[in-house]
Structure formats: structure tokens, C-alpha cells
Amino acid sequence: MPADNKSGPQATRAYHLFLQELSGHLAFARELVSTPREQQDDWDELARAVHMVKGGAGFFGLSEVAGIAAQLEARLRQPLNAVLKQCDELTKLVAELEKIEKTLPGKD
């Protein structure tokens, strides 16, 4: 677990839960940006998921993940027509997160 001040069995469980949720959120993000849909609810759901990733990453000291998630969230919070025009950039940000995810401590 990367953050030095977070230790003990509860923190370890929380970190592993974060990793599991991160994988699920990234899978959803990859699917949505690769086959964009015009339902605002889908993009709102993804923005909420990315917000949770940003917060969890910050809590565990994963500043690079938190920073990329913040960029992704800012783009997702724009009006739908602007979001749909940025799918290439969204795809790049999701790919960056997926690349980092593979290198995180505790990732199987």
C-alpha cells in the first residue's frame, strides 16, 4: 500500500477494495469512451465514478492517479455535446489510468 500513514488490516482491506473498484470503473470508462452514447445519465455515472477514483487515489497517496482522474472528471463535467467531441482525449486519459493501474502495489 503506497501511503505510509495508512497501515493496519482495515487500511489494507480498504486499499484492496479501492483497487477492485478502480478496475471496474476503468472498464466502464473504457467501454463508454470507445462506444459513446448520447445518454447524459451514462456520462454522469462515469463522472461520479471518476470522482470516487480521484478521492480514493488521493487518500492512498496515489497522486498521479488522482491528477489524471481530476483531468478526466473536469472533462466529463462539461455539457454532453462537449464531452462527446472529446472522446479521443478521454480515451487517452483512461488508457493512462489503465497503464498506471497495472503497476500499483498490491495489483494482482
Image (spheres, rainbow, N blue to C red):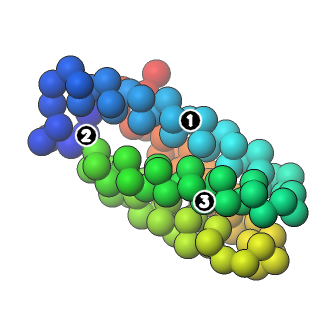
Task: Give percent across and percent down for residue 93.
Answer: 60, 60
Quick one: SS at disc 3? helix
Mark toward the viewer: 2 or 3: 3
* Res 27 → quadrant: top right
Residue 61: image location, x then y, percent: 27, 50
Residue 65 higher or lower than 106, as above or below? below
Q: Amino acid at mark 3?
A: Ala
Secondary structure at numbered mark 2: loop
Q: Which mark is residue 89?
A: none
Q: Nearer the viewer, residue 35 or 106?
A: 35
User: Residue at coordinates 61% horizontally, 44% vertically from top-left?
Assistant: 26
Label 1 sits on residue: 23
Q: How far apart, in angstroms, are the residues tagged by discs 2 and 3?
A: 25 Å
* Residue type pointed to by label 1: Ser
Q: Label 2, on which residue?
A: 2
Residue at screen point 81% across, 70% down: 84
Kindly report which numbered mark, 1 or 2, lies closer to the viewer in this rendering: 1
Neighbours of disc 2 within 10 Å: few (<14), some (14-19), many (20+): some
How far separated are the C-alphas under marks 3 and 1? 15 Å
Residue at the limit of the structure toward the front, as seen here: 41
Q: Name the residue at 75% across, 57% down.
A: 41
Residue 52: x and y in percent read 47, 50
Q: Which residue is mark 3?
A: 47
